[in-house]
């Protein structure tokens, strides 16, 4: 069973615990993508200010932004 990135951080936030800045981004992506119900994949919303840190961003998109 694959571990979905952002679940741990999201649960920590919801329980009122501290999370790192990167953890906040992972949790927001997790929430925005509907808890990755359709599977962990790139959201392809490159206009999002957090997209550069999106955990499941396609590798080709990484090269374009550099």
Image: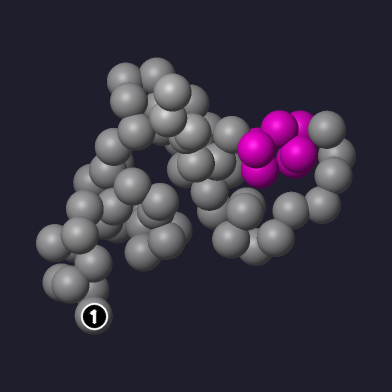
Give the side of residue 18 with respect to residue 8, left or right. right
Q: x, y percentage for residue 45? A: 27, 48
| Residue at the extreme right of the image, as rendered | 16
Considering every residue shown, the one lying at the far bottom of the view is 66
Q: Quadrant of residue 39?
A: top left
Q: Position of residue 65 (x, y in %)?
A: 23, 73
Residue at coordinates 40% horizontally, 51% vertically from top-left?
A: 55
Residue 45 makes an appearance in the image: no
Viewed as shown, does residue 25 lie left or right of 57?
A: right
Please tell me whether residue 45 is drawn above or below residue 37 in the rendered image.
Answer: below
> Is the magenta region chiefly helix, strand or loop?
helix
The residue under the point 83% across, 33% down is: 15
Label 1 element class:
loop
Residue segment shown in magenta: 8-14
- In the figure, is residue 40 to the left or right of 35? left
Residue occupied by mark 1:
66
Q: Residue at x 75, y 40 (%)?
A: 13
Q: Give the x, y percent position of residue 18.
A: 82, 52
Please say whether residue 6 is one of the residues in the magenta stretch. no
Rendered image quadrant of residue 36 = top left
Mark 1 burial class by Cα count in 10 Å: few <14, some 14-19, many 20+:
few
């Amino acid at each position: 069973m694959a571990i979905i990135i952002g679940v741990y951080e999201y649960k920590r936030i919801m329980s009122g615990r501290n999370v790192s800045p990167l953890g906040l981004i992972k949790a927001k992506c997790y929430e925005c993508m509907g808890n990755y119900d359709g599977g962990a994949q790139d959201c392809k919303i490159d206009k999002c200010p957090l997209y550069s840190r999106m955990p499941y961003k396609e590798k080709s998109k990484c090269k374009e932004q550099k």
